[in-house]
Amino acid sequence: MRIQEVEGYLKGKINVDTDSVASIWTTFKEFCEKDIVGEDEKEILFECGTYDFTGKEMFHFSFVRQFTEYEDDEYLGMSQLHCELLFTPFDEFKKLQVTEWSMGFESLDEFFRHIENLKVFKNVVNLKPKTVQIYQEEC
């Protein structure tokens, strides 16, 4: 699979209308294990917090895979594939902001376990998001 195909691939695997956070997370983790043509290294981001990016304050719970693309050792660019789950804000997490990159971990499995052990993850994993957005953007 090429970087240009990842958004369509993930959209085909996730039902944004019915999938739970747990199901989306499982699908995203499986996607992160796949090798992508031209990708230098796997860079995965988990972030969450209450923001008004959409014009309305929402709790954002996001899984991101970042791609740094090279061809014949020539840098071609960087993009991110976002899987963003939006919820009505939680009072408990009103001031919480989490940003965790996989590069600080020995393996993807260690990174995934770390995310799954976060209190916020445990509280959100069995919920149904209000909205799920899957999109790719250049950085």
Image (cartoon, helix red, strand yellow):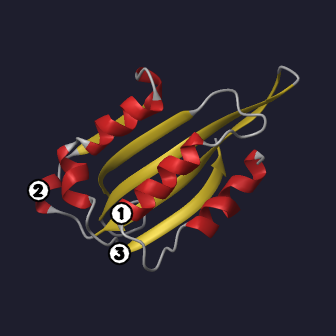
The percent coordinates of residue 90 (x first, y second) are 17, 63
Q: Secondary structure at mark 3?
A: loop
Quadrant of the image occupied by residue 104? top left
Where is mark 3, residue-wise?
130
| Mark 2 burial class by Cα count in 10 Å: few <14, some 14-19, many 20+ | few
Q: Are marks 3 and 1 in contact (CB under 8 Å)?
A: no
Q: Residue at x 36, y 69 (%)?
A: 20
Q: Earlier in the sequence, mark 2 or mark 3?
A: 2
Residue 53, how many percent across, how many down? Answer: 41, 60
Residue flagged by tag 3: what amino acid is it? Lys
Residue occupied by mark 2: 92
CB contact under 8 Å: marks 2 and 3 = no
| Circle 3 or circle 1, nearest the eye | 1
Residue 30's place in the image compared with 12, above or below, is above
- Side of 20 relative to 63 (left or right): left
Q: Which mark is residue 21?
A: 1
Query: Three-letter amino acid code at disc 2?
Result: Glu
Q: Secondary structure at mark 2?
A: helix
- Vertical side of 112 occupied by 102: above or below: above
Q: Is residue 94 left or right of residue 46?
A: left
Residue 119: image tag? none
Q: Amino acid at mark 1?
A: Val
Numbered disc 1: secondary structure: helix
Q: CA distance from mark 2 to mark 3?
A: 18 Å
Find the residue positioned furthest to the bottom.
17
Observer-nearest of 25 and 77: 25
